[in-house]
Image (spheres, coloured by chain):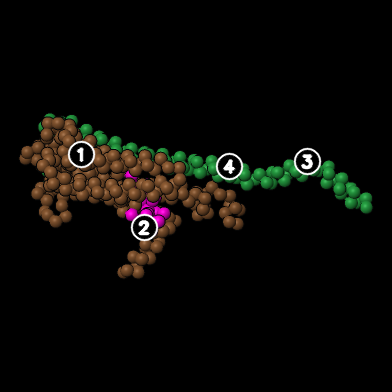
Chain colours: A green, B brown
Amino acid sequence: MPEPNFATLAAFIDMDGHGFYVWLSVALALLAIGANWATLRAARRQFLADARARAQGGDALDRAPALEQAAATLLDGPLIEKNLNADSGR
Amino acid sequence: MWSAIKRLWHKLGSPRWFFQLTERWELVLGLAALVLLTWGTVWGLAFAPPDYQQGNSFRIIYLHVPAAIVAQSAYMLIGVAGVVLLVWRMKLADIALKAAIPFGMTMTALALATGAIWGKPTWGAWWVWDARTTSMLVLLFLYFGLIALRQAFTQPEQAARACAVLAIVGLINIPIIKYSVEWWLTLHQTSTFTLTEKPAMPPSMYLPLLLNVLGMYCLFGTFMVGRMRLEILRREEQTRWVQERLAITAPSKAATA
């Protein structure tokens, strides 16, 4: 690699009066890359959060038949008992 | 050789295969991009000699040219993905088409913005309706169009086909961008890089540019793979392998499925 083209840091920043144009371009490039990185990261996080929420909702639905059965058993309890009593009385 | 290509082609039909294949690509490409872009930019900004006519304002080339090259390459990839989608109806082609748009669009905008910034000290104007700048602006509108078109449809299959058609039609703009500086009398300089000729610049000027172009391709690969993998997870969310991958399925259910 050759020697640095600028003697001082101030000269490097100024770039013979073209510093504004060059550094503005550098800033825009960093902004463009940063925006891509941030949007991808945000989309990933959003997807994972949504997927987890859907999974939890799905689990609740999966449990629903079992809950319904439990509720039916509780509600029909006296009826079952009556049937059992009727069976034992026969 | 031919059978290997055929096998690879068939495998590309499986988003799951691609997802597993690219497990570490994002990290490797990201690191390569970081190293190449840092090296190329530092070399170009601090060590490369100034241009004999433009002075230090020419250093914008180290950001402008890689952005412009990758913006066009991204669109070419989108066009090829469009052809693959329409002809072979490959799921991965639509995923690739969708994934390449954000980075391609950002790089087109960056190329236009840095071109305008470079134009001010060089041409004395931020913008000129030059054939090269105008055709690049058309490319930006094509990217906007692809995003808008996808959102205009409620059916994903219809959206994918419409985007593929627009992508293919838009390919006509790529040779126009490339040859605009030769076909018309423009303020914009001729191509910095060609595959057939030796660069007019000395190695101390074009080597950092080459590093940045390679780095920008690696960066494109990083975001492309990242977005494709995310899109695969979105589309295949209901499949068992994604459910297991996300570890959101109850173990008993996963075992019995």
Instruction: Give how far apart the Cα atoms at labels 1 and 3 are.
Output: 75 Å
Q: Nearer the viewer, mark 4 or mark 1?
A: 1
A81 inside magenta stretch: no
Q: Residue at x 57, y 54 (%)?
A: B254
Q: Which mark is residue B64?
A: none
Q: Callout 1: 10 Å neighbours few (<14), some, many (20+)?
A: some
Name which residue type carries label 3: Leu
Name which residue type carries label 1: Thr
Instruction: Give how far apart the Cα atoms at labels 3 and 4 are.
Output: 26 Å
Work out which residue is located at the far left of the displayed protein and give it: B52
Q: Is residue A32 above or below residue B72?
A: above
Given the image, what chain letter belongs to the residue carrying mark 1? B
Q: Which residue is disc 4 drawn over?
A: A57
Q: Residue at x 86, y 48 (%)?
A: A83
- CB atoms at circles 4 and 2 under 8 Å apart? no
State the residue in front, B3 or A30.
B3
Instruction: Give how far apart the Cα atoms at labels 2 and 3 are.
Output: 60 Å
Q: Which mark is residue B87?
A: 2
Q: Callout 4: 10 Å neighbours few (<14), some, many (20+)?
A: few
- CB atoms at circles 2 and 3 under 8 Å apart? no
Q: Which mark is residue B134?
A: 1
Q: Of marks 3 and 4, which one's residue comes earlier in the chain? A: 4
Given the image, what chain letter belongs to the residue carrying mark 3? A
Instruction: Report the magenta residues as a range.
Output: B83-102
Q: Are marks 4 and 2 on the same chain?
A: no
Q: Position of residue A4 (x, y in %)?
A: 13, 41
Q: Which residue is disc 3 drawn over?
A: A75
